[in-house]
Amino acid sequence: MGVGTIIFGLAAVIIAEAILPTRTVFQAIVACIFGAIVYRCVIAFALNMGGFGLQASDLKLITAFLMALAC
């Protein structure tokens, strides 16, 4: 386990809390799974976009922007 795993987990929780309101434990788990899917989709989209001139090394910038947007 590394830093990337911790960032992925925190990103999933932050996105889940920002998008879906939770009332029960089951809803919180579903929201975290949804947040993880959204996070991975945004990362895949950012890496596959060649039109904006982004490189794979710009991934930290994309994730920081996503986290700032979610908060």
Image (spheres, rainbow, N blue to C red):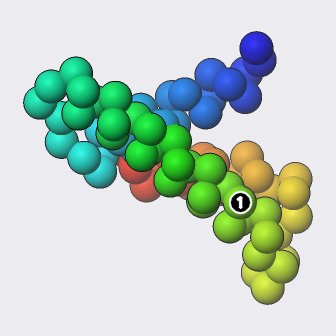
* Whether residue 60 is situated above or below residue 43 in the rendered picture: above
Q: Is residue 21 left or right of residue 50?
A: left
Q: Write the residue at 11% across / 30% down.
A: 23
Would you identify the image quadrant in which residue 29 lies? top left
Disc 1 designates what residue? 44
Q: What amino acid type is highlighted by mark number 1?
A: Ala
Q: Write the residue at 47% across / 49% down.
A: 68
- Mark 1 Cα-neighbour bin, 10 Å: few <14, some 14–19, many ≥20: few
Q: Write the residue at 29% across / 51% down.
A: 19
Q: Is residue 57 left or right of residue 30?
A: right
Provide residue 8's location: percent of width, then percent of height: 61, 33
Provide residue 69's location: percent of width, then percent of height: 43, 55
Q: Is residue 35 left or right of residue 2?
A: left
* Whether residue 32 is situated above or below residue 60 in the rendered picture: above
* Whether residue 35 is situated above or below residue 38 in the rendered picture: above
Provide residue 43's location: percent of width, then percent of height: 67, 55
Q: Write the residue at 76% across / 81% down.
A: 52
Query: SS for tag 1?
Result: helix
Observer-nearest residue: 29 or 51?
Answer: 29
Would you identify the image quadrant in which residue 48 lies? bottom right
Observer-nearest residue: 37 or 16?
Answer: 37
Is residue 31 in view from this perspective?
yes
Is residue 14 in view from this perspective?
no
